[in-house]
Image (cartoon, rainbow, N blue to C red):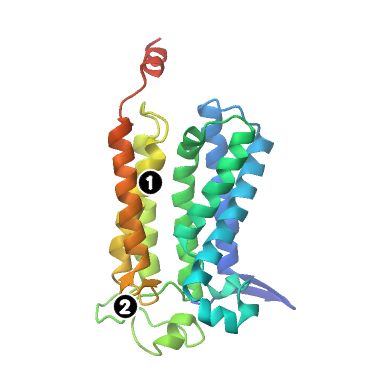
Amino acid sequence: MHPILFKFGPIEIRFYGLMYVIAILAASYLIKKEVRRKKISLTDDDVMNFIIWTVVGGVIGARLYYVAFNLDYYLSNIKEIPALWHGGLAIHGGLLGGILVALSYLKKRGVSFWRMADCVAPALILGQAFGRFGNFMNGDAHGRPTSMPWGIVFPPDSIAGSEFPGIPLHPTMLYELSINLGIFCLLWFVLKNKGRKDGFIFAMYVALYSFGRFIVEHFRADSLMFGPIRAAQAVGLVIAGAAILFIISKKLWVEPAGRANARRR
């Protein structure tokens, strides 16, 4: 594996960046499709603007979150802060940044955040799966040493390979990629067409991803930490609990009466 797909003179095309482009294109198609199906009052141009601004907010949030947990290093290496191709995006920071931008954008257009969030959730988890393949080729978001037969020795010039030269590691990027694809299939093919209250799909995404990430985080070697506690596990448990309480308190699995009557006609 190698982080660079190909070079043309001074121009480098990296898997990490390519996966983000593919993720945005796939997400754009799925979100537009869902917006039309749900008859949300946004044009295709509105949807693209929403996606662009949300992605920008998400990337900024993800990077700032990561930098905050490695502040000593980045204060001594200021030029590394924008170097996204070296790895260092935290999904929980990305969610926070993206949600803040989405709330502002949708409020100005009079669109329900929860209704739109249900359109975005399947596309978001699919995009995360593409992103994990980029991590795999980049050799970051890596696992601990393992004696399992599927352990992978990463190239010495990668982040994983430089930290553990010549040592097989858990391919945690592929673990999470598989979990993310499973969540996508559940949200897109099983849940999205059933009558549910707005917010159910997004809350299920948050809960399922958080539990999946909790498991994968156990095998990670580069976890962000709250002292002795892995940050992703702690934050994941909190937001998973909040998502489940939201589902239960609002009875989101119950189809609204008005929508159910419309489906029977």
Query: Can you tell which quarter of the image residue 142 is in?
Result: bottom left
Q: Earlier in the sequence, mark 1 or mark 2?
A: 2
Question: Disc number at residue 205?
Answer: 1
In the image, is residue 61 above or below residue 120? Answer: below
* Tag 1: amino acid: Tyr
Question: Disc number at residue 243?
Answer: none
Question: Disc number at residue 151?
Answer: 2
Pinpoint residue 242: horizontal percent, then vertical percent: 33, 46
In the image, is residue 6 above or below residue 262? Answer: below
Per the image, label 2 sits on a secondary structure element best described as loop
* Tag 2: amino acid: Gly
**Which residue is pictured at 38% across the width and 83% down the height?**
153
State the CA–CA distance, disc 1 to disc 2. 29 Å
Query: Can you tell which quarter of the image residue 232 is in?
Result: bottom left
Can residue 215 be seen? yes
Q: Residue furthest bottom?
A: 165
Mark 2: few/some/many CA within 10 Å (<14, 14-19, 20+)? some
**Which residue is pictured at 41% across the width and 35% down the height?**
199
Can residue 208 be seen? no
> With 10 as the anchor, is 40 left or right in this view?
left
Pinpoint residue 43: horizontal percent, then vertical percent: 66, 31
Per the image, label 1 sits on a secondary structure element best described as helix
Mark 1: few/some/many CA within 10 Å (<14, 14-19, 20+)? many
Q: Residue furthest right?
A: 9
Contact (CB < 8 A) between labels 1 and 2? no
